[in-house]
Amino acid sequence: MSGSVVLLNLAGAVALLLYATRMVRTGVERAYGEVLRQKLRSTMKNPLMAVILGTALAVALQSSTAVTLLVSSFAGAGIVSGMAGQLAVRGAEIGSALVVKVLSFDLSLLVPVCIAAGTGIFMTTERREWRQFGRILVGIGLMLLSLELIGQASEPLRDSSLMPVIINYFSGDPVTAYLLAAVVTWLFHSSIAGVLLIVQLAGRGLIPSDLGIVLVLGVNLGSSIIAPLLTRNAPPEVRVVPIGNLLMRGLGSLVMLTAFLTFKPSTALLGSTVPDQIINAHILFNVLVLLAGIPFSKVVYRASQALVALNTPPKPAEPLEMVELSALNEADLGTPSQALANATREVVRVCETVEIMLKTIFELYEHADHAKIKALAALDDRVDHKTAAIKLYLAKATIQQMTEDEALRYQELLGACVKLEQVGDIIVRNMLVHVQKKAQRKLEFTPEGWSELASFHAAVLANARLAFNILISRDPDSARQLVVEKDRLRDFEKATSTSHFERLREGAAKSVETSTIHLDTIRDLKQINSLLTSMVYPVLEGQGLLHKSRLKAS
């Protein structure tokens, strides 16, 4: 087999590994992302729990970089401290190393099982969580399949006359090998993919253990660079955690490389085979970095802050006031198509504001920050002002010149304005009152109750985003899916209420204290979901997919 064909097969197998890893991560984020974020916020105050949760998140998301970015955003918002964030990232690195260990076993039998089961689940249900679970299973199956393909693609390299020359060169120049592994990992944006590639090549006898350990240290350097580069334009508070990870993991890999090349320790203690030695070295390195990071966490945190401050330009003394432009051009009123397009642009902006309000209100349930409460009220005023302007603009449009489709779009936009305004009112006049009552009385939800609220809110937020997309795309399949989700949410609400009343019967003190707030919040979220879902009814009506009444015929 020619060398170009071998490299092409190897490149395809690596590409499948990267795609499958991303597939698993996006599936977890879409199905359980909001619940994971809520869990992260509530447990990050304990250093040990921060490490454990970081490890678990990395296993779930198949990416320590994703955990680093998530923790950085929380640190930037002041939800978690920078030091707790760094400990969580340390745990995430160990989690990603454990994923490599699990995937190194012979799991070939799971390939057809995961792909078949995942495809079956994805194709036979409309429920978002189950579809994403099917997506996760397919992703895991493709990951395992890609590892088999990497092994098969690299098999001809055993007989290559050029391969020993390359290996001997890098064995004699470990610094170049270390830097090359770092660059490749940065290109992959995945330390898991980088280590698995090394392990598969080592399993075919192509990479000796000493060179493999050097390459793994390079993978850790490359992985620690990814998050700082991705957050380079973020606010300073967000960049502290990635920079701290670079100091600990990046410099740690350099120190370990120097020690390894200086003392040349035996690798036999790490395992009986070369792949085991490489994987165990990867795990051991991240454990050592975690153990070293605990006593030096304050020093690293201060150094991170200093580096970020050094690379942050000073803020201008008098920043220019941002002027928000309006798309409601009066000159376009005589052209219905253009006027409707202008109104649509403004409605989309209102949708973005409502989404921010819906996310912020749940953050306030956990921590009633006074500044955020004022900002939320200001956002509601903005929604009222913009929807009033849009309705007035549409009222001036020349209805007589509109086609039938344009007239339907006209009514759809007016209806959306009314419903978005109502959603804003529910958030500020109802849910914000619950937040203030909870804060004033210093009430706390039970872990079960909070988990139910978080799941319910996550579902409503996902449906809101889907409704806003449908408002633009007018896709009937997506609209049908949203109505299905509304029915499922109604069943979820009944189950949640039943669970809540069971806790009340058992006499849980916290459940009694927060009962009214819990039930009212569920009711408000359900009402918001119904309003947003009704925004897409015109799309279904236009396709003849909506009954006029849910009542049975007499």
Image: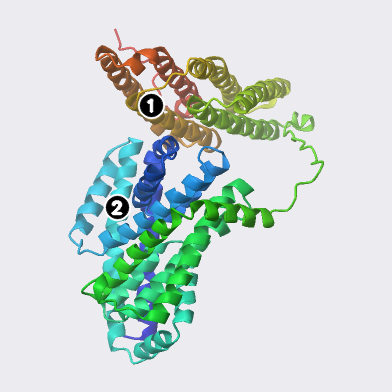
Which residue is located at x 20 percent, y 74 percent? 272
Left or right of 508? Residue 249 is right
Quadrant of the rendered image containing residue 353: top right
Q: Position of residue 392 (x, y in %)?
A: 71, 20
Quadrant of the rendered image containing residue 501: top left
Specify the farthest residue to the front.
Answer: 295
Dot placed on the residue nearer the N-terminal end, 2 or 1: 2
Q: Which mark is residue 450?
A: 1
Residue for badge 2:
138
State which quarter of the image contains the C terminus.
top left
**Residue situated in front as seen by the camera: 392 or 366:** 366
Q: Position of residue 404 (x, y in %)?
A: 58, 27
Say above or below: 406 vs 31. above
Give the amino acid type for the residue marked by disc 1 in the picture. Trp
Which residue is located at x 41 percent, y 42 percent? 30
Q: Which mark is residue 290?
A: none
Specify the farthest residue to the left.
Answer: 109
Residue 120 in sight from this viewpoint? yes
Say above or below: 177 vs 58. below
**Residue situated in front as seen by the camera: 219 or 27:** 219
Q: Secondary structure at mark 2?
A: helix
Q: Residues within 10 Å of mark 2 (few under 14, many from 20)?
A: many
Say above or below: 78 vs 25. above
Which residue is located at x 48 percent, y 60 percent? 248
